[in-house]
Amino acid sequence: EVQLVESGGGLVQPGGSLRVSCAASGFTFSSYEMNWVRQAPGKGLEWVSYISSSGSTIYYADSVKGRFTISRDNAKNSLYLQMNSLRAEDTAVYYCARDLGSTSCYFDYWGQGTLVTVSS
Amino acid sequence: SSELTQDPAVSVALGQTVRITCQGESLRSYYASWYQQKPGQAPILVIYGKNNRPSGIPDRFSGSSSGNTASLTITGAQAEDEADYYCNSRDSSGNHLGVFGGGTKLTVL
């Protein structure tokens, strides 16, 4: 059974940093592209970042470029999102999502999400 | 603002057919995917590509596309289909960035 479990969310002050993680199981993690998607309270979904299966190709939404860093450790079946210079508008549930891998976006499995709150 | 546009809310009578649409220039180049999200839950993929359903998704869900518009159709809507629905695709910049529509709240009457 495919499972994605996020962790590492919490309360952080504006300007602070936080790293969220996603532990994958039930599939060959190293064969899949992965993404982070977030959802602010009461709002819609927002794509955040993409990483290829090897980690060699990475993309970011303009809203987080220069502040967030996506990475993965295929030996540990884990995906990460390092978030720096956090702002109140980064407050959201952060989901990791497996990508079916095509020219478009097809996210076939999602984790349950981890809540990041940026507030003083 | 989103590059994919959805109606904020749609309603359908129980057992009837409803179509939820998503408009955007990137849909001329990329297929959309559709996600169902119920309160307090993670999204679930219901349609992807030309018209593909993941395992476990009922066949009352179908997808289509024409020009800059993608559509999700539910034929014979059930009470459990009441949820938020989001479309998703690449953005129109050609830079492999993802983009979601603003979401459509489906109410089953």
Image (cartoon, coloured by chain):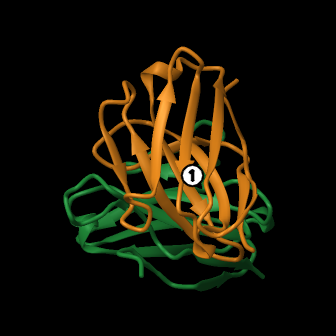
Chain colours: A orange, B green
Q: Identity of the amino acid at label 1?
A: Val
- Horizontally, is B98 left or right of A119 in the view? left
Residue farthest to the top, as pictured? A75
In this view, B9 is above or below B14: below
Looking at the picture, how far across and down is residue A77, in whole percent? Answer: 58, 22
Query: In front: A53, or A81?
Result: A81
Q: Is residue A105 above or below residue A13?
A: above
Residue at position x 62%, y 65% in the image: A39
Residue occupying image coordinates x 28% and y 44%: A103
**Residue A88 on image: x %, y %:** 63, 75
Quadrant of the rendered image containing residue A76:
top right
Res A1 → quadrant: top right
Vertical side of B108 occupied by B98: above or below: above
For mark 1, give the secondary structure.
strand
How far across and how far down the image is residue A38, in percent? Answer: 59, 60
Relative to B41, A53 lies left or right: left
